[in-house]
Image (cartoon, grey):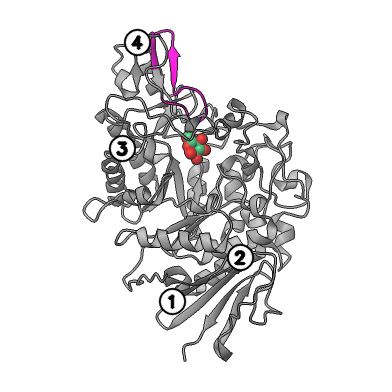
Amino acid sequence: MSIARTAASVERPWWEPGVIYQIYPRSFQDTNEDGVGDLEGIRRRLDHIAQLGVDAIWLSPIFPSPMADFGYDVSDYCGVDPLFGDMAAFDRLLGDVHARGLKLLLDFVPNHTSTRHPWFVESSASRDSPKRDWYFWREGAADGGPPNNWTSDMGGSAWAYDAATGQYFLHTFLKEQADLNWRNPAVRAAMTEVLNFWFDRGVDGFRIDVLWHCIKAQGLPDNPLNPHFLPERGEKFRVLQQHSANQPEIHELAHAFRAIADAYGDRLLVGEICLPVDQLMAYYGGADAPGVHLPFNFQLFDAPWDARIISHIIEDYEAALPEGGWPNWVLGSHDAPRIAGRLGEAQARVAAVLLLTLRGTPTLYQGDELGIGRVAITADQVRDPQDLRQPGLGLGRDGARTPMAWDASPHAGFSTCEPWLPLHADWKTRNVADQGADPRSMLALYRDLLALRRREPALAFGDIRIMSSSEQVLQYERRYGDTQLIVALNFSASPSDVSLQDGDGDELLLSTHGPHGFEGQLRPDEAVILTRTSR
Ligand code: GLC
């Protein structure tokens, strides 16, 4: 039951105690009156980020894109889409971010390009194009259908037919997103230049999009059918992605990315990898061939909200970490349902305490610090291509991508005109200005938690040990040197009779319910952090 990891006293890279804040640029702040956020908007809102107390900002893609998948279909890796601004706006933002002592991460999308990227345009021009092999072009099957049975994550076959050259090309996502052939050294060389371009400009690292997809099995064999396929979960699950993802050679590629980053010093690579924990761990790489610094740990996205289950998740994850592997936890993203929508506001507060007191680098997603809940998106408001292609399955991601609410002025201060997606219904009170003035708000809780994390090395670096867990209450300690912090979380709306205080030596550092009234037992939906003085 106990897990203990020793916090080394050596100097740590910035991202170990750091907290990452994800910005979805379309929805942060609009300054050019088009209802879509932009880089200048982010720059003008840096006060919010600094006051919140995070360390790094990760921007979802800002590169030129036809926006079929809202920027994850890149048509130029070394530019800025005019919707978001220009390179001068980027440099201004980066300069201001650094001036505040913050870091900036970009989103590197290596698995696929837009079909409007000049590389793909050239590749599709003819069968003997010098760039033909930059992508996956194949003859149809004997019956004229797709070359194999791979399905797109966005629904339908993963192959699109190109009438001009009479062959199919592979797209793991939309047909506007063609998969690159990473076994081709020319692709690697071109993408190395991309990474160097941004590192030279001063960015502090990258989140790497769908890293585990980048290498496909030689020969592109059919995937096994999924015996447990449920159509309502989406066509992506019709087959098991045995040959189309997570190939052994991916680790060599992750290591190559890491070597590029390491050549610049203190840079960070975070990998988006959606795999079970045992397979996820391989993305840390080995001592002689390190992979990404942080393979994203998404387990809190869909874990049943039960103290015992979360306790096992923490223990199993910690136990699985390779020597020297630094943990990380993610609570929300532009792809996942809002945490407050899933758990309700009271438990979303408990979840905030969990995220910011677990061992490892937390990533929090814009708007979760306001507790934005489920946003109703009507059929005519749907923008997400995943939802448009497979309607009615509840796969839509628009609900997590709605604009930030800054104040009670029209359009919540996000824009002077109608935003591209609707605001949450309660934006007039659920906004940064209102919550910033209310010490009981979700925003105040996040600020308090982040300030405490900064003050208490035990939260940033300390060992973690689960002390107890029942269905209702999870209790763990964070220990660093002589400091022992106790975190106790009530996952239910009933009071708990577990007595937490251990004599006079305990001091309440933080409670989701405010500084007063805690008497040693958790109230409904309460999470606390105590400090225990060793006697
Ligand atoms: C990642 C992104 C998601 C995108 C997909 C394809 O999962 O987070 O938004 O649709 O990759 O690039």
- Amino acid at dot 4: Ser
**Mark earlier in primary sequence (1, 4):** 4
Circle 3 residue: 247
Taking 17 as reference, is 188 left or right? left
Disc 4 crowd rating (10 Å Cα; few below 14, some 14-19, many 20+) is: some
SS at mark 2 in the image:
helix
Circle 2 residue: 447
Asked whether 94 or 424 is in front, the reply is 424
**Mark earlier in primary sequence (4, 3):** 4
**Mark earlier in primary sequence (2, 1):** 2
Disc 2 and disc 1: Cα gap in Å?
22 Å
Q: Is residue 153 magenta?
A: yes
Name the residue at 52% across, 48% down.
93
Circle 4 residue: 126
Please tell me whether mark 4 or mark 3 is closer to you in this view.
Answer: 3
- The dot on residue 479 is 1
**Mark earlier in primary sequence (3, 1):** 3
Please tell me whether mark 1 or mark 4 is closer to you in this view.
Answer: 1
- Main secondary structure of the magenta stretch: loop
**Mark earlier in primary sequence (2, 3):** 3
Residue 349, position as x, y percentages in the image: 64, 62
SS at mark 1 in the image:
strand
SS at mark 3 in the image:
loop
